[in-house]
Image: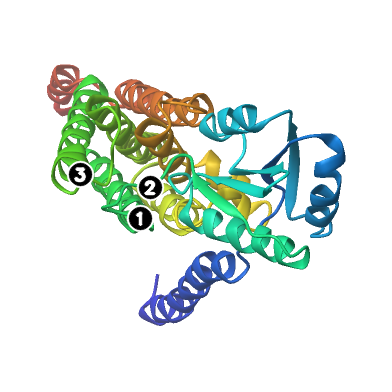
Amino acid sequence: MSATRRLIAVVLLVPTLAAVALWAFAWPAARTAPRDLPLGVAGPAAATAQMEKQLSAHEGAFEIHRYRDEAAARDAVEDRTVYGAVVVTAQGPTLLTASAASPVVAQLLQQAVARQAATEGTQVTTVDVVPAPSTDPRGAALNASVLPLALAGIVAGAVVTFLGLRGFRAVLALVGVAALVGLVAAGLADSWLGVLTGDWWAEASVLGLSTLAVAAAVAGCAALIGPAGVGVVSFLVMFLGNPFSGAASAPRMLPEPVGTIGQWLPPGAGTTLLRSVSFFDGAAATAPALTLVWWAVFGLGAVLLGAQLKARTTPAGPAAEQREPALVA
């Protein structure tokens, strides 16, 4: 490529990347709003009818789940079936929230239900069923952990690739790095900062698996298509995975299909799984765990496959040395 073409490529590429980054990060943030947000309503049908009607007036905002009483609604919140629930009683409505699932959603529900109750001249009693830790009431630390884990995975995959590690050696390096990252991250977030409150080893496993999913994808893609694979997966994780993760709010608060896509990528699945393990005793952890395992398994499989393909296309050293004298003769 000539110098002029390289200059033109740089001039066009950098603004394009900047535009994509602004779109990926700014657009979901600017369009944050509830979209079919799971919300429970509990109490006698006659008493809840008016509340359901008022909530349904927010077209497309809430997905109403009905429960017979407060205990059932509380169980649904703790199981992560709903983000909150309105329990209608003779004394007035009681709002059950889970700020550990999303402080932003908990605040939004308080505002929405309070407005509805104000029109009826009643007050709302709010009960935080699963509160966020006092050391991180707004979830800022959890949100801030998404980018470092993604970067750690990208760096690990890139280093393994450019050091020329292949096959089982590459797999061992990726698994070892991810395990150490998980231990260090759990030590910082749980033992030191106290922003995670679940089982320590489960949190370390989730943090390590999140790192491995990215690292294996980077190294696996590079093993199949070359060094360009590092850039492909890095772009996917950094420019889509991070802003689409819903870590700052919730997946159901992002425009569609952004929220869904984010849960298919390691940052979004890792954040959801970490919340479940740390605050909800593993409730609703199956789907995000399978997503991370899928990324890790297919990434490591691609690393092994790429090594085999490379070995088949590269002639053995001794055989090549034996052919050289024959060619000279």
Rendered residue at 35%/34% (across/down): 278
Tell me where residue 45 appears, x and y as whole percent: 84, 36
Rendered residue at 31%/25% (across/down): 307
Assign a secondary structure to mark 3. Answer: helix
Viewer-nearest of labels 3 and 2? Answer: 2
Of callouts 3 and 2, the N-terminal one: 2
Tell me where residue 198 appears, x and y as whole percent: 30, 32
What's the CA distance linking mark 3 and mark 1?
36 Å
Q: Amino acid at mark 3?
A: Val
Q: Amino acid at mark 1?
A: Pro
Rendered residue at 23%/29% (across/down): 200
- Does the residue at mark 2 contact the one at mark 1 (Cβ under 8 Å)? yes
Above or below, comparing residue 222 to residue 326 in the picture: below
Residue bearing mark 3: 159
Of callouts 3 and 1, the N-terminal one: 1
Assign a secondary structure to mark 1. Answer: loop
Tell me where residue 83 appears, x and y as whole percent: 58, 43
**Which label was assigned to residue 220?**
none
Residue bearing mark 1: 137
State the quadrant of the N terminus: bottom left
Residue bearing mark 2: 132
Along the line of sight, which residue is nearer the eye, 273 or 91? Answer: 91
What's the CA distance linking mark 2 and mark 1?
5 Å
User: What colour scheme was applied to this rendering of the protein?
Assistant: rainbow
Of callouts 2 and 1, the N-terminal one: 2
Above or below, comparing residue 69 to residue 54 in the picture: above
- Does the residue at mark 3 contact the one at mark 2 (Cβ under 8 Å)? no
Left or right: where 184 falls relative to 178: left
Left or right: where 117 falls relative to 157: right
